[in-house]
């Protein structure tokens, strides 16, 4: 058997397997408890809160007051970034 034919058969076989598997997969149902909880929580949030949760400023660029004001979900602390004032790393809970 020639190399070209083997490669064609391999590609066709892989594509066929991919298509068979992808049609057999079913999407996650919205009846999932976690999905319902997330949807419920997201529906109560303002646009500002949603954006704030997606932001991730560095410890050097934000204060605890700004964390609360802008609804920040998390703060980066690593990769050489040290807080200019270590007191900012304390008491960030809401």
Image (tube, grey):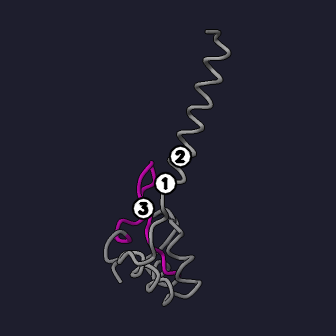
Label 1 packing within 10 angstroms: few (<14), some (14-19), many (20+): few
The image's mark for residue 83 is: 3
Crowd around label 2: few <14 · some 14–19 · many ≥20 (10 Å): few
Which residue was labeled with disc 1? 24
Per the model, the C-alpha gap separating discs 3 and 1 is 50 Å
Q: Position of residue 6 (x, y in %)?
A: 61, 17
From the image, which quarter does the C terminus lie in? bottom left
Q: Left or right of 33: which side holds 80?
A: right
**Mark earlier in primary sequence (3, 2):** 2
Residue 12 is covered by the magenta coloring: no
Q: Badges 1 and 2: C-beta atoms under 8 Å apart?
A: yes
> Residue beneath label 2, please?
20
User: Magenta stretch: dominant SS?
Assistant: loop
**Which of 4/92 is in front?**
4
Q: Is residue 69 above or below residue 90?
A: below
* Res 90 → quadrant: bottom left
Q: Is residue 2 left or right of residue 77?
A: right
Q: Relative to 4, say whether 29 is above or below.
A: below
> Where residue 41 appears, x then y in whole percent?
44, 84
The residue at the far right in this view is 4
Q: Which residues are magenta?
A: 70-88
> 41 or 93, which is in the foreground?
41
């Amino acid at each position: 058997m020639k190399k070209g034919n083997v490669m064609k058969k391999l590609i066709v076989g892989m594509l066929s397997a991919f298509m068979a598997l992808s049609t057999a997969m079913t999407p996650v149902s919205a009846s999932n408890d976690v999905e319902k909880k997330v949807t419920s929580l997201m529906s109560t949030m303002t646009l500002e809160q949603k954006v704030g949760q997606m932001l991730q400023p560095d410890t050097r660029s934000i204060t605890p007051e700004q964390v609360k004001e802008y609804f920040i979900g998390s703060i980066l602390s690593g990769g050489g970034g040290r807080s200019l004032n270590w007191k900012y790393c304390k008491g960030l809970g809401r």
